[in-house]
Image (cartoon, helix red, strand yellow):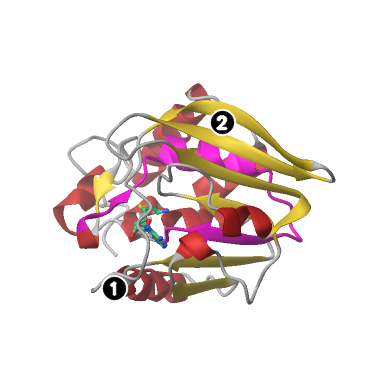
Amino acid sequence: MTVGDGQADDQDDTGGSPAERKMRFLFALRSRGIIDPRVLGAMEAIDRGHFVRGHFAARAYDDVPLPISCGQTISQPSVVALMTQALSVNPRDTVLEVGTGSGYQAAILAQLARRVYTVDRHRRLVREAAQVFSALDLTNITALTADGSRGLPDQAPFDRIIVTAAAEDPPGPLLAQLKIGGIMVIPVGQSDAVQSLIKVVRNEDGFDYQELRQVRFVPLVEGIGTD
Ligand code: SAH
């Protein structure tokens, strides 16, 4: 890994040492409304540079989404932080993430939860993310290739579910796999339009829905990919 490894000579042309870069990164999150100290601590602990490859690594600390393998994207850090904050993860929680992508969001969740299951429809993304998890010794993440729109019935129910690809509606199997008292955060809407990030809370009588903000995610696609 070349970025954020704490070497004194690890300067880049966007200016500053790794420590200064980290301070700017956290300041940007705070200015975007991220106030939960546990979320800020997790964002500080996990270096986004590990999850971005090639020449995009130089932009790992900018608040922008970046391309990853299989035509997918790593979300922008402020959106990762906002979704994590909205999920209100407790230390004993079991979390399902649909859309492993680079693995960055799962790594953040792994700082806050007891166990994280993360699934992606692209085998290659799961393999690459699992390599980073093991390099970072994040042993409480299980990464699997699966169609996450069906959830993960063998491990259900979940305390928290986060979907990092946009569905037209929250998939029924995911709602069914949420515990009573559980929370799901998911972008909903057409893939080619602006979508709404919503928070779903399951209570004794059904589900409460709250709209958080507008977002733009790649689509949730059914079935397993070919790579
Ligand atoms: N959370 C990721 C970003 C995810 S991008 C990160 O932190 O980097 C969205 C991901 O959702 C893509 O990798 C895409 O392959 C995946 N995806 C789309 N439809 C899916 C489905 N039905 N099941 C599982 N993963 C899916």
Q: Quadrant of the N terminus?
A: bottom left
Seen in the picture, residue 66 relative to 3 is either above or below; the reply is above
User: In the figure, is residue 209 to the left or right of 69?
Assistant: right
Residue 154 in sight? yes
Q: In the rendering, which numbered label is found on residue 147? A: none
**Ligand 1 image position (quadrant):** bottom left
Q: Quadrant of residue 140?
A: bottom right
Residue positioned most to the left:
55
- The residue to which callout 2 is attached is 34
For badge 2, the amino acid type reads Ile
Q: Label 1's element?
A: helix
Of residues 85 and 52, which is closer to you in this image?
85
Question: Mark 1 and mark 2: span between their CA atoms?
Answer: 32 Å
x, y percentage for residue 116? 59, 65
Seen in the picture, residue 4 relative to 223 is either above or below; the reply is above
Ligand 1 closer than 8 Å to label 2 CB:
no
Bounds of the magenta segment: 71-100
Q: Quadrant of residue 63?
A: top left
Magenta span includes 186: no
Residue positioned most to the right:
204
- The residue to which callout 1 is attached is 124
x, y percentage for residue 154? 63, 77
Residue 35 in sight? no
x, y percentage for residue 4? 35, 53
User: In the figure, is residue 67 to the left or right of 171?
Assistant: left
What residue lies at 50% left-to-right and 34% top-to-bottom? 197
For badge 1, the amino acid type reads Arg
Of residues 95 and 11, which is closer to you in this image?
95
Q: Label 2's element?
A: loop
Magenta span includes 82: yes
x, y percentage for residue 42? 56, 49
